Amino acid sequence: MRKIEKRSIFCLILAALLGLGLAFFCFRFVVDGGDWASYPYNRHLYNNAGQLKGGTILDRDGDMLSTLDEDGNRIYNDDATVRRATLHAVGDKNGNIGAGALTSFADKLSGYNLLTGVYSPLGTGNSLYLTIDAYLNNVAYQALNGMNGTVGVYNYKTGEILCMVSTPTFDPANPPDIAADDPAWDGVYVNRLLSANSIPGSIFKVVTINAAIENIPDLFQRKWTCTGSVNIGGEEVTCPHAHGEQDIEEALANSCNGVFGQLAVELGGETMQQYADAAGLTKSIKVDGIQSSVGKFDFSGNDNQLAWSGVGQGQDTLCPINMLQYMGAIANGGKAAVPRLIEKSTTDYGLPTGIYYPHKSAQLIDEKTAGTIADMMHNNVIETYGQDRFPGMDICAKSGTAEVGADKSPNAWFTGFLRDEATPYAFIVLVENGGGGSSVAGTVASQVLQAAVEKGY
C-alpha cells in the first residue's frame, strides 16, 4: 500500500512538473515566438544568402527605405545618400547590423502572428513604418560631413525617434569589402546611438549639477575663483583657461572643471553614483525591444579620480540614447517618453498588425530641479554657445569636449532640448575626435534642429 502511495505521489509530482514546464513553454512562446520564428536559419523567412525574404520598411512619411523587387531581392531607396543616412536604422542585407530593423524587427516584417506563424497568403510580409524621417537623417548625415559619430533627435512627449544617424556608414545597395582591421571602418556595424559607449566629457556635468542642487543648500550663494587649475587630492584638475570669479550658473556656462570637480568630491562617490543611476545612465533602454548598451561610472577612487569622474572624464562612459532620454526628462518635468522606433505596421491589405504607443520613463529627476537645470542650460546658450545659431528656438543645451587619449583629438558632444510645445525635441550629437563640443557638435546640432523645426513633426 505504501509503495502505491509513494508511486502516486511521485507521479503527481511529475505531472505537476510537466504542467509547469508546459505553462512556461506557452508563456515563452507567446512572448518570444516572434524571435524564434525569425531566427536567421529559418529558410521560410531567409534565403540562402541570409537575406530576409519579406517585408517593406518605410519612414514616417511613407518613403520606401527597403523592400523586395519582383524577383524577391532586397532593394533600398533610390537615393544613395538616403541609403547611407538610414543604414543603421534599416540594416544591411546580411544582418551584420544587429540593431537594424531588418534584424531586430524581422518578426514584424515577416507578418508573424500566434495563429498563422509566418504564413502570408501573398508572401510579401508586412509594411513597417519607422518613426525616423529620411529627410532629417539625410540632413544629419551631411552635417557630419564624413566625421564619425552619431546624431539623435526624439520627441520627448511621444518617444518617436525622428533622427538616428551613425557613422561611418556605407551604401547597403553596394556594400564595400570591409577588412576587419581597417581603421576607416572601425565600428561600422555598430549603431552608435543605441549600442556604443563613449566618454561623456562635460555633458555629464548636468548630472553633477543635479546632485549639487539637491544636496548643497547654499550652492546658489557660493562664489569660486578659477585660475585655470585647482589641486584636488594632491593632483591638478585643469580647465582650458582661467574663468575668474563665478557663481554656479556661470560655472556651468563656462563648463569649469575645477568647480565641478570640487562639487563631486564634496558630494562623495556614493551620492554621485546614486544620481548617475537615477538619471538612467547605468541602465539599458529597450527601444521597441532593442537593448541599448549600459553606461558605466566609477566613483570609488581617490579624490582626484572622483573629481575627474564628476566632470565626465576618468572611467565614465555612457550610451548616447540614455543621455537623450535624460534630456527629455529634464525638459518634461522629470519623466520622458521612452525612445521608440516603430510608428506602425500593416498587412498586405493595409490592416494594422500591432499597437504602438508611448511609454513613460521612470522619474529620472525631480520636477523642480529639472526646471532649474533647464533655465541654467538655456543660459549656457545665451552666454556661451550663441542664441543666433539656433534662430527662433527656446533651446537648452550643454556641450562637452571629452579627452580620449593624448594622441587623439577630443570627442565633441552637444546635447539638450527645445522648450516648445509644438516642437518638443531632445537631441544629442557626438563627433568622434571632432574637437570642441560647441564649435563642432553644436554646429551639427544647429543644422539638424533647424531642419526639424522647419518641418515640424
Image (tube, grey):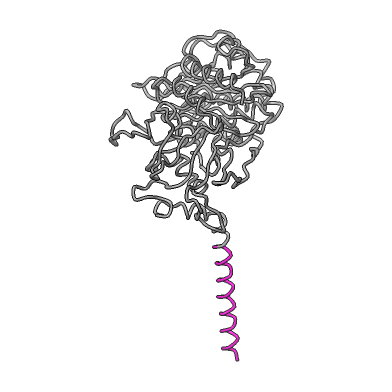
Q: Which percent across, then down, holds residue 154?
A: 58, 29
Front-most of 222 and 36?
36
Asked if residue 269 shows in the view, the reply is: no
Quadrant where the image shows the C terminus = top right
Image quarter of residue 416: top right
The magenta span reads 1-25
Query: Measured along the vertical axis of the image, is residue 142 above or below residue 77?
Result: above
Front-most of 48 and 400?
48
Left or right for 267, reference 146: right
- Is residue 2 located in the magenta-colored stretch of the structure? yes
Q: Which percent across, then down, holds residue 371?
A: 69, 23
Name the residue furthest front: 70
Query: Measured along the vertical axis of the image, is residue 170 above or below residue 219?
Result: below
Asked if residue 152 shows in the view, the reply is: yes
- Is residue 324 located in the magenta-colored stretch of the structure? no
Q: Residue at x 67, y 28 (%)?
A: 332
